[in-house]
């Protein structure tokens, strides 16, 4: 009886350890990220908004801009995260996600009166902005918990975001059938529920690097690749064979099982950590810090507050902790901002217009859906590839991460040119290239910011860094692509003897619709690649050094203190 009580008590203690562990937090972050990419599904349901509300392409692209604005302006979530616990950040994100997308669903289904355009822009901006709270809560916390594996960590987490479009597509087919309006409802409630379930699992833990840490991440990678391949196979199968409701349910069930497989890896790692803790000799010795050290710390904090504004233009060495102003006003950040404006701005424009691109080139609606899924899946491959490969090239060859960004932007140029000068089937290849290059840019951007400017204010800085993305999207999507598309569509209307009032929505057909816009996008992206190359040249000496040295020294210092304390006890 006593042994049974002891065993049950041991099990409870282990479960508490598991739920509070670093590896379980990684698993929880994967699930949150797998539901945090609803913005990539805009191409699937944008046609419903356009037809239901009678918008032209410029107005639809304006909605797309506000979606991108909400998705990328995460400064507020970063600042909130600096002063509040992570669970609070995740709860705010859940509420915003539900309110924003639920209002869009009510509008599209006619359950509320037709709102004004600015109201629709507000709804989609609020809904999209919620993913910044998920990013700030889960992604930033994971990077701080695994500082020496930040490249692979960012690649995996952003990879799951990239897959989220395809994952949620499978779920909505299983739950609602082929009703894209109901997809908006799924986007409203599912991410909110997942974030609330794991709201207390995401928190900063004490960093204890394990020897096999990188192998664990490779296990996570293999599982996620299998999930991506399964989703790709389902995407192809659904276009070749008619799926019944039962088939969609089966597919969604397998998808959910694959999402939970990383839990087995997390449990295995937490068991190892648990066993290691039991072998450690507990220390009862209370180590008191000398009064002088405390005084020095207080003096240092006071000095830091006083000198914050005075040292704005006198930043520390690259890799040290910059203040927010030091980072934002540094030449490195300005160069990175310009490259992001060109690269991500062009990529967002291409992805947002994918549905209309397929329509203009005469592809049927189910094929257009496959383009969106292809972008989502290859978005994933781009993210994990850039995370793992850039980490490998950095560790083995000291290759600057901005150089990887340059290569990715050149690949993006090829995708834009395939849209500008289409041949039969070229949109499939363009979807793959655009999805891959779009996905690859984000982990590289976040990793470069964390490496150049430190982790102290990372939650704010990475959100500031991606502000260039919606700005680029507005100029390139709304002011360039949307207006040029509408101009071409009006030419076609005039040729048919019609006016704008004679049609509900303004539609352009033919390869001319997107030729000039995508030539411009390719040129802008090429300029971004040259800018990124400039940053690679500027930072090559920094990357040739040991950029993770201070994290290893900190860990070794903690280990020596633990050994010292155990010997005293």
Image: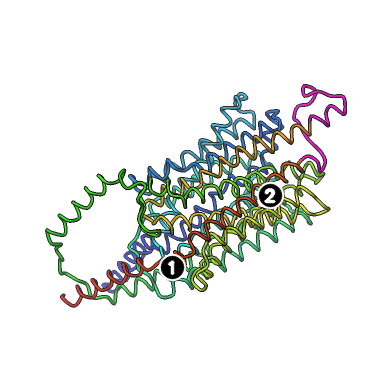
Residue 252 visible in the picture: no
Image point 18% across, 51% down: which residue? 299
Circle 1 residues within 10 Å: few <14, some 14–19, many ≥20: some
Q: Is residue 294 magenta?
A: no
Image point 45% across, 62% down: which residue? 150
CA separation, marks 1 and 2? 34 Å
Residue interval drawn in magenta: 490-513
Q: Quadrant of residue 316?
A: bottom left
Q: Is residue 491 magenta?
A: yes
Q: Quadrant of residue 141?
A: bottom left
Q: Is residue 71 left or right of residue 19?
A: right
Residue 425 vertical placement versus 109 (above, below): below
The residue closer to the viewer here, 329 or 43, is: 329
Query: Mark 1 sits on what residue?
Result: 267
Q: Residue furthest right?
A: 496
Image point 32% across, 69% down: which residue? 553
């Amino acid at each position: 009886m006593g042994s049974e009580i002891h065993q049950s008590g041991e099990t409870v203690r282990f479960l508490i350890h598991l739920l509070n562990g670093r590896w379980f937090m990684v698993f929880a972050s994967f699930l949150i990220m797998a539901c945090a990419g609803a913005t990539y599904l805009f191409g699937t349901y944008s046609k419903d908004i356009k037809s239901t509300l009678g918008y032209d392409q410029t107005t639809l692209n304006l909605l797309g801009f506000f979606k991108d604005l909400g998705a990328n302006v995460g400064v507020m979530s970063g600042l909130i995260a600096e002063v509040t616990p992570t669970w609070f950040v995740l709860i705010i994100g859940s509420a915003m996600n539900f309110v924003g997308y639920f209002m869009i669903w009510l509008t599209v289904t006619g359950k509320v009166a037709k709102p004004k355009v600015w109201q629709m822009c507000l709804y989609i901006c609020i809904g999209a902005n919620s993913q910044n709270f998920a990013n700030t809560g889960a992604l930033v916390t994971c990077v701080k918990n695994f500082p020496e594996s930040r490249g692979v960590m960012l690649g995996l987490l952003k990879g799951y975001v990239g897959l989220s479009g395809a994952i949620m597509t499978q779920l909505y087919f299983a739950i609602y059938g082929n009703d894209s309006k109901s997809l908006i409802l799924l986007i409203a409630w599912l991410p909110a529920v997942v974030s609330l379930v794991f709201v207390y699992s995401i928190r900063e833990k004490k960093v204890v690097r394990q020897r096999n840490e990188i192998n664990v991440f490779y296990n996570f990678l293999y599982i996620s690749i299998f999930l991506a391949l399964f989703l790709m196979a389902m995407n192809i199968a659904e276009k070749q064979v008619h799926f019944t409701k039962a088939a969609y349910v089966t597919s969604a069930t397998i998808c959910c099982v694959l999402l939970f497989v990383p839990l087995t890896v997390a449990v295995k790692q937490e068991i190892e950590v648990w066993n290691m803790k039991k072998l450690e000799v507990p220390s009862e010795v209370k180590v008191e810090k000398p009064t002088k050290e405390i005084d020095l710390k207080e003096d240092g904090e006071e000095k830091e507050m006083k000198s914050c504004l005075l040292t704005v233009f006198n930043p520390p060495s690259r890799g040290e902790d910059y203040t927010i102003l030091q980072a934002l006003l540094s030449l490195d950040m300005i160069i990175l901002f310009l490259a992001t404006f060109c690269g991500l701005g062009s990529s967002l424009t291409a992805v947002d217009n994918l549905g209309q691109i397929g329509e203009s080139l005469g592809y049927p609606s189910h094929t257009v859906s496959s383009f969106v899924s292809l972008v989502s899946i290859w978005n994933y491959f781009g993210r994990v590839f850039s995370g793992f490969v850039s980490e490998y090239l950095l560790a083995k060859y000291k290759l600057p991460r901005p150089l990887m960004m340059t290569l990715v932007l050149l690949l993006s140029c090829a995708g834009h040119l395939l849209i500008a000068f289409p041949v039969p089937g070229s949109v499939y290849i363009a979807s793959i290239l655009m999805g891959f290059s779009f996905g690859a840019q984000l982990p590289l951007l976040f990793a470069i910011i964390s490496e150049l400017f430190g982790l102290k204010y990372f939650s704010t800085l990475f959100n500031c860094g991606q502000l260039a993305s919606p700005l680029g999207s507005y100029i390139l999507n709304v002011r360039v692509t949307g207006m040029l598309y509408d101009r071409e569509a009006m030419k076609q209307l005039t040729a048919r003897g019609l006016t704008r009032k004679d049609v509900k929505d303004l539609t352009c057909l033919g390869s001319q619709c997107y030729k000039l816009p995508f030539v411009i996008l390719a040129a802008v992206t090429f300029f971004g690649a040259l800018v990124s190359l400039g940053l690679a040249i500027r930072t090559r000496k920094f990357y040739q050094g040991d950029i993770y040295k201070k994290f290893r020294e900190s860990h070794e210092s903690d280990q020596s203190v633990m050994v010292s304390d155990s010997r005293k006890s």
